[in-house]
Every structure is written in C-alpha cells, then in structure tokens.
Image: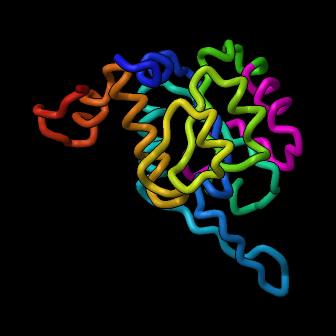
Amino acid sequence: MTGAEQRAAAVRLLVMDVDGVLTDGRLYFGSDGEAVKVFDVRDGLGVKMLREAGIEVAILSSRSSPIVEQRARELGIAPVVQGSTDKGAGFAALAQALRFAPAQCGYIGDDWPDLAALAQAGFAATVSDASPEVRRISHWISEAPGGRGAVRELAEFILRAQGRLRDVLRRHGGAETGSDA
C-alpha cells in the first residue's frame, strides 16, 4: 500500500472546497449576481458513495452561494461552511466540531486559499488543474480537472484504499467481479 493509500484508508471525514473542485472554477454572473454553477453528476455520485460507506462529507468554501447550499442539500452534505476566509481555521473547527483527529480527515482543494487546510489534513488531495503549490503538498492528484469528475475519482480511491469499493459497487447493481484492488 502506498503512502497515499494508507492516508486515504484512515479518512473518516472528507472536507471539500467548491470552486475549482466541485465546479470547474468559472463563475457566471448575471445582472442579479451569481446565476449559475455547473456541477458534475459523477462527483455527486462519488459524494453519495462516500456517505453510504459511512464517511462524513463537509463543504468549506471561501465564497457564499445559495447554489452551493442547494447542491449540498441534494447530496446530503452537512455541514456546509461558506464565506470562510481562513480555511485553515475553518478546517480545524470542522474537524473539532465533528470530533475527528486531523489524521482522520481528508481535504480536497485546488488553489492558494486551500493550502493551510491541506497542510493540516491527514490526507491532502487535489485536482489535475490545481495550482503548482497545491499539487506540491498534496498526497493524491486526480487525473480529472476540477468540476469534471475529480471528486468521483477521489471517492473511488478512498473507498478502494479502505476495501469498501466492491460493497458500494454491489449496492449500485455492480457485478460481483468489482475489485478493491
């Protein structure tokens, strides 16, 4: 088992950034303010897979958006912390409030505001199109860019490392030949 797999095997809480992770990072504004965020359905299924396996999922975002609240409700994600300008402090507060040691927490982010949270997480993950500084300190990097299936890829990696992927696949009608390897 690689170092990244060992770290992923310990994850009991996954904290996610939104813009650049669950979305492609682009912001769409209309005359009434932010109008649209685009989320990938595969990422949504990845979140649901983690939750089915008993892994808590939370959102920590420096921006605030009712669209994020709506998507989180659809996926059953709680807590959702928005408007957090200090993600290091936000991450620590989430871990403490949910009673997880940092070693039991994963964090996925993509840019400089995520560096402090990534540095605290037992398992630091990022997307393929993240900033070089974030890529440098991450234990795992997706092949997919942010907003295009990276969270699903991460969910499968965590579940595989924990030996739970096959069980989750079966619950979704997958073949008995599914593998955790």
Residue at far bottom of view: 31
Q: Looking at the picture, how far across and down is residue 85, in whole percent?
A: 88, 45
Q: Looking at the picture, how far across and down is residue 157, in whole percent?
A: 39, 33
28 sits left or right of 13 in the view: right
**Residue 180 sits in quarter:** top left
Q: What residue sits 68% from the left and 57% below the top?
A: 19
Q: Quadrant of the C terminus?
A: top left
Which of the pair 122/162 is nearer the observer?
122
Q: Quadrant of the N terminus?
A: top left
In the rendered image, residue 86 lying in the magenta stretch gets the answer yes
Q: Looking at the picture, how far across and down is residue 48, in whole percent?
A: 46, 41
1 sits left or right of 120 in the view: left
Q: What residue sits 72% from the left and 23% below the top?
A: 120
In the rendered image, residue 63 lying in the magenta stretch gets the answer no
**Residue 167 sits in quarter:** top left
126 sits left or right of 167 in the view: right
Which of the pair 35/111 is nearer the observer?
111
Q: What residue sits 51% from the left and 26% below the top?
A: 55
Q: Which residues are magenta?
A: 73-95
Q: What residue sits 81% from the left and 50% below the top?
A: 62
Q: Looking at the picture, how far across and down is residue 166, in whole percent?
A: 24, 29
